[in-house]
Image (tube, rainbow, N blue to C red):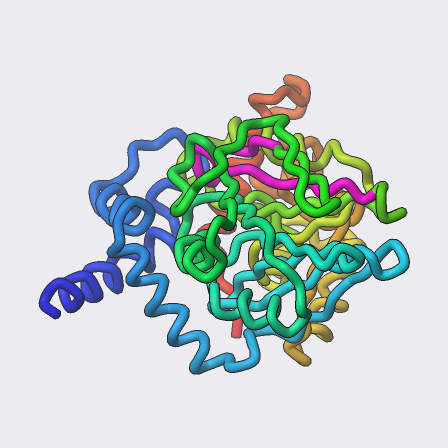
Amino acid sequence: MFFYVVAGVTMGLGLYCVITRGRARSSRRTRPSLLFTVMYWLYSKTHVGYWYHRHLLTKAREKYPDGHSVTSAVTFGGLYLKIQPVAIVSDNYSYVVMNTKRRIAVVVDPSDPEAVQAYVKQEGIQLAAVLTTHKHWDHSGGNHALKRMFPGLPIYGSATDGVPGLTNPVLDGDMIQVGGLEFHVMSTPGHTVGHVVYQLDGAPFQAPDSLFTGDLLFIGGCGRTFEGDAATMLKSLEKVSSQSDNTIIWPGHEYTLENLLYGETIDGDNENIREKLRWTKDRRKARMATCPSTVGDEKQHNVFLRTRDPAVAEAVGMATRRLTGVTEEFQASVLAALRERKDKFKVST
């Protein structure tokens, strides 16, 4: 009991700045504070972090018994491909990806194992694999429990990220085939050292590809660089934004409203941002999910994908550097400035 009291106080004091705000190590190559180092290690490397995740999960279930957002499944290929977002914790999404013809499912980032188990049972399908984008408990917290619920269940994740319950380590360029579903692995470090995203091949279902982006790319935003720098994150974002414009984006969090409100402060004359923001406000008033998006849409309204745009660079005080040319170094500097400002951004109430 004493351990849990100490852990609770410690996590309560420290994790606010580490996970919620993340200012100690934003996007620059700055030495992290001692508080950040200790708190982040506790959260990402120990069962103290898992206990804290379970605490947040319990609180979220009490506050949102039906999930934080209203979600609906998207179907393709004569209903043979079905993707169901599952709203968990306070703003996370897991995704159950189903081949309905074979009655096989894969789940991406199942931090609430009970919610996943309930949905699989409801659909009458077989859970065949877990795909984990990264080690943070709000994405991986259900791995161990699902292994117990479904003996022999393979858990996929980065070979370098320390994913809990990992059975099948993956590397950049790997292909995962499960029940007629084919996923391609992309290494996208920056948020964590081993963060990966999974691209589902939509061709067998006469559908666009689907990209499950974890904490790399959100609708209108991107993740914090906890274990990398802006240059690393830039390359990862470009890897995703170079995919076909019709590629469907399934993000790990419901951050759309805050992201677009921030984007409006950077590029307020952008009608794409304003239109998406109006749509998002209407959705969130009804607690409706804003996912998915597409690569093409994100390139229009996501300022973190527009580090080459003079308007975005000027907004973060870097207009004078345009004369030197748009180099990767320049783009990384713009991204670092964008991320630093976003870390300090607060939504007006």
Measured as percent of width and height from the top left, residue 38 is found at 22, 45
In-front residue for pair 282/65: 65
- Does the image show residue 1? yes
Measured as percent of width and height from the top left, residue 104 is found at 68, 55
Farthest-out residue, top: 324
Which residue is depicted at the point 83% across and 45% down?
A: 208
Left-right relation of 231 to 17: right
Farthest-out residue, left: 2
In-front residue for pair 37/348: 37
Task: Assign the N terminus to one quadrant of the image.
Answer: bottom left
Location of residue 135 by image quarter:
top left
In-front residue for pair 139/334: 139
Farthest-out residue, front: 151
Residue 83, placed above or below residue 249: below
Left-right relation of 211 to 262: right
Measured as percent of width and height from the top left, residue 151 is found at 46, 54
Left-right relation of 220 to 210: left
Is residue 46 highlighted in magenta?
no
- Does the image show residue 292? no
Is residue 201 highlighted in magenta?
yes
Which residue is depicted at the point 71% across and 73% down?
A: 283
Residue 168, placed above or below residue 86: above
Measured as percent of width and height from the top left, residue 250 is found at 67, 53
Number of numbered labels in the structure image: 0
- Find the magenta span and give its range: 186-202
Which residue is depicted at the point 24% across and 61% down?
A: 13
Location of residue 240 by image quarter:
top right
Which residue is depicted at the point 79% across and 54% down?
A: 272
